Image (cartoon, rainbow, N blue to C red):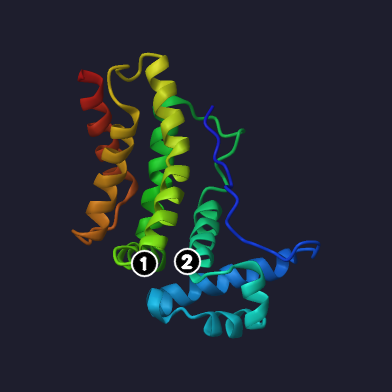
Amino acid sequence: MTKIKNFEGSRTGTAGRPRDDTKDEAITSAMIAMLAAHGYDGASFEKVATAAGVSRPAIYRRWKAKELLVIDAVRAMLNEDLAAYTDDTPAHGIAAIRLLMEIVAKRLADPEKARIIVNVIAAAVSRPELATLLGDLEWQRREPLLKAIKEAQATGELSACSDPNLIVEALLGAVYFRRLFSQSKPDGRTTRQVVDGILGISRLL
């Protein structure tokens, strides 16, 4: 069965100093709010510190660069969306793929979350360090889909000749394109049609 991992972030703390998880959560939540309200450029450590009720040094002790905090904040947002998908979720193969894509579509249907994703992707275009971190996060986040696809291939639901990474990119690309470029919010019915269409093609390969 496919399992969602709550991937750890890139925070750095002072050696021997206990980490205050409450502050960590307050800081990442404040960063998400700043990204939604002001975009990447407007989400400064100063604004985040004020919103989180902490000092700027408290942020720097945990994250040495803005890019690191942004990626950890986005990671926390994604983990929250996927919290209900665990080892106990009765979904396998194609059923798991459909469920995972419904979670992605639901996230993109949220105007604030979609705005954050667009802001971070746009910022990464001209910031190599952020682009690298975002790429690493994307590879981590595709792991559950890859596992579900490979499971479906192993049981014969999907063709074993299809490249699992290409199927992942086709699935995510279709849903993201519809939301970010056509401005159509993906609903459950449309998302299932897109997923089943792409999986249907992969069965023929």
Position of the C terminus, as image quadrant, is: top left
Q: Secondary structure at mark 1?
A: helix
> Horizontal and vertical percent for residue 110?
39, 62
Q: Secondary structure at mark 2?
A: helix
> Horizontal and vertical percent for residue 120?
38, 65
User: Which residue is painted at 33% across and 62% down in the image?
Assistant: 121
Q: Who is closer to the viewer here, 156 or 161?
A: 161
Image quarter for residue 97?
Answer: top left
User: Which residue is painted at 39% across and 49% down in the image?
Assistant: 104
Q: Is residue 186 left or right of residue 26?
A: left
- Say whether marks 1 and 2 touch (CB < 8 Å): no
Labelled disc at residue 111: 1
Query: Mark 1 to mark 2: distance in Å?
Result: 23 Å
> Horizontal and vertical percent for residue 131?
37, 58
> Horizontal and vertical percent for residue 165?
33, 33
Q: With respect to residue 166, does 84 lie above or below? A: below
Kindly identify the amino acid type of the residue bearing the numbered disc 2: Glu
Image quarter for residue 109?
Answer: bottom left
Q: Given this view, does label 1 or label 2 mark the residue nearer the observer?
A: 2
User: Local crowd at mark 2 within 10 Å, few (<14), some, or many (≥20)?
Assistant: many
User: Which residue is painted at 29% across and 63% down in the image?
Assistant: 125
Kindly identify the amino acid type of the residue bearing the numbered disc 1: Pro
Q: With respect to residue 186, does 97 lie above or below? A: above
Position of the N terminus, as image quadrant, is: top right
Labelled disc at residue 125: none
Mark 2 = which residue?
Answer: 67
Q: Who is closer to the viewer here, 69 or 14?
A: 14
User: Local crowd at mark 1 within 10 Å, few (<14), some, or many (≥20)?
Assistant: few
